[in-house]
Image (spheres, rainbow, N blue to C red):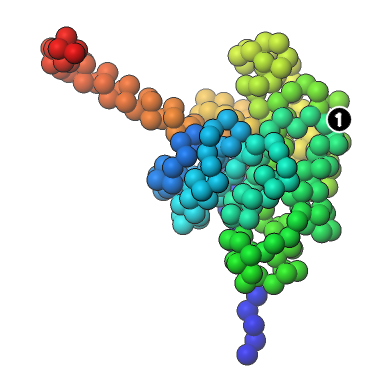
Amino acid sequence: MEQTIKRMRPSRVLQKMRAGEVAVCTKLNIGNARVAEIAALSGIDCIWTDMEHVPNDWSAIESQINAAKMHNVDTVVRVAKGSYSDFIRPLEMDASGIMIPHVMNLAEAKSIVRSTKFHPIGLRPVDGGNADGAYCEIEFIDYLQQANEQRFNILQIEDPEPLDELEEIIKLPGVDMIFFGPGDFTQAIGFPGQWDHPKLIETRRLIAKLAQKHAKFAGTVGSVSNWDELVSLGYNFISVGADVVGLGNYYKQLLDDIKKKHTTTIDGIYSNN
């Protein structure tokens, strides 16, 4: 009987970007599988969960990945900068991609490629006995090839230091996406929160331009208001919104609406407290 080759779950994000479309992502700070599934049910392409700023443990991350992929939605995990194990664990949990914050130079970019790509691109340590390898059901060589094709790394540029080597970083074989982080960048150049600063605008344009030049993907955070501008620059992975912002705005709006229609009742409640 002819054996069927088992396939790794394909990346929805890569499929869209390779087709010339823009992949839509959203940020999750709440480490809960239900929140991940609610976001996935919206039809979004990707959730971005976090281990740099958020005290998520590995079990929470794994649950979010599983919740998202039930609805054919990718998960990107922003890792804490640590050992190579911190890079590969999310991939072995079947995250579609990992995001590495504050990449500072070409040497660091080379190290990331070595740890996140299999032969012949890098030397990522091999297991295959986890979710991404279908628990050893995907044949060894097929697993290496499919992982290189269907999983991706994202290198964040958030500081001025890597700009001198930016083109070398972007064109490095095995780098899949460059992601511009404007928040930390404004702080690093000494103008925190100045979103119209010329250096920020220049760097955002440069990253997209060099990514297009070297056939790489460019990502950043955005909003409804600047969506068209980012797409016109060449960004094909845009993260919009966040669970904490959405939840906070919902409850504030809910209370404001109650106050407008039931002022006496609300004031009475407040005075009693």
Q: Residue at x 13, y 16 (%)?
A: 265
The residue carrying mark 1 is: 165
Q: Residue at x 32, y 21 (%)?
A: 252
Would residue 59 appear left or right of 129 to someone viewing this image?
Answer: left
Instruction: Provide residue 118's location: percent of width, then percent of height.
Output: 77, 57
Extreme-bottom residue of the structure: 1
Is residue 158 or residue 273 the one in the foreground? 273
Instruction: Provide residue 253's location: percent of width, then percent of height.
Output: 31, 22
Instruction: Provide residue 261's location: percent of width, then percent of height.
Output: 17, 18
Indicate the quadrant containing the N terminus: top left, top right, bottom left or bottom right: bottom right
Mark 1, other Cα within 10 Å: few <14 / some 14–19 / many ≥20: few
Q: Is residue 7 visible?
A: no
Indicate the quadrant containing the C terminus: top left, top right, bottom left or bottom right: top left
Count of marks overlaid on the render = 1
Is residue 211 or residue 20 the one in the foreground? 211
In the image, is residue 269 above or below residue 225? above
User: SS at mark 1?
Assistant: helix
Quadrant housing residue 258? top left
Quadrant housing residue 196? top right
Would residue 191 appear left or right of 31 to someone viewing this image?
Answer: right
Would residue 32 appear left or right of 16 to someone viewing this image?
Answer: left
Q: Is residue 114 visible?
A: yes
Quadrant housing residue 217? top right
The residue type indicated by label 1 comes to Glu
Q: Residue at x 73, y 42 (%)?
A: 83
Instruction: Provide residue 46's location: percent of width, then percent of height.
Output: 54, 45
Is residue 215 or residue 90 the one in the foreground? 90
In the image, is residue 187 above or below residue 204? above
